[in-house]
Amino acid sequence: MIRSPHIASLLVLGALAAFSSNAAAAECKATIDSTDAMQFTTKALTVPKSCKTFTVTLKHVGKLPATVMGHNLVLGKTADIAGIAADGMKAGAAVQYVKPGDARVIASSKVIGGGQSTTVTIPVGKLKAGESYTYACTFPGHSSIMRGTLTVK
Ligand code: CO
């Protein structure tokens, strides 16, 4: 009888702890892990409006090479991300699967493989509160699964 409310309150405490550690780190950076299972471990980012830039460190915590399980992080409006990914795939590996000069791309990293990491700097001044943004991996076949939302607050 006591047991489940107790577990529930532990879960609430855990959630609060995670929330407050994020809030305390109201800093202008975040780390996102990516895996051999074609996943970003973080599916949503909130960027404080007060940041000039927001730096995302993308880590590939898997073992597969970039040619097989490459990951990048490309940010655009949610409405644009499918087009960005389709054109990036056509543009190819030599340009990190991002079409050169693509005005829809707000920020993009290079492609990394297992054990590697990279950073991408997001110009927060170009983002609008209330707009829906999505970050995705534009490696062929990844963008429909490897994606997350980005919100400015
Ligand atoms: Co990927």
Image: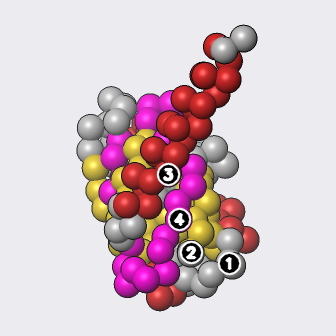
Q: Is residue 135 magenta?
A: no
Disc 2 or disc 3, which is closer to the eye?
3
What residue is pinned by disc 3?
19
Nearer-N-terminus badge (2/3): 3
Q: Quadrant of residue 8?
A: top right
Nearer-N-terminus badge (3/1): 3
Magenta-drawn segment: 35-60
For numbered disc 1, what is the local secondary structure? loop
Q: Residue furthest bottom?
A: 125
Rounded to the nearest angstrom, the CA distance separating label 1 from label 2 is: 8 Å
Q: Are marks 2 and 4 in contact (CB under 8 Å)?
A: yes
Q: Amino acid at mark 4?
A: Thr
Image point (57%, 49%), residue name? 43
What residue is pinned by disc 2?
152
Q: Is residue 11 visible?
A: yes
The N terminus lies in which quarter of the figure? top right
Rounded to the nearest angstrom, the CA distance separating label 3 from label 1 is: 23 Å
What residue is pinned by disc 1?
131
For numbered disc 4, what is the local secondary structure? strand
Task: Report whether the residue tagged 3 is closer than 8 Å to ligand 1.
Answer: no
Nearer-N-terminus badge (1/2): 1
* Residue closer to the observer: 89 or 45: 45
Disc 1 or disc 2, which is closer to the eye?
2
Q: Amino acid at mark 1?
A: Glu
Image point (47%, 74%), residue name? 48
For numbered disc 3, what is the local secondary structure? helix
What residue is pinned by disc 4?
46
Nearer-N-terminus badge (2/4): 4
Image point (44%, 31%), residue name? 36
* Residue closer to the observer: 77 or 27: 27
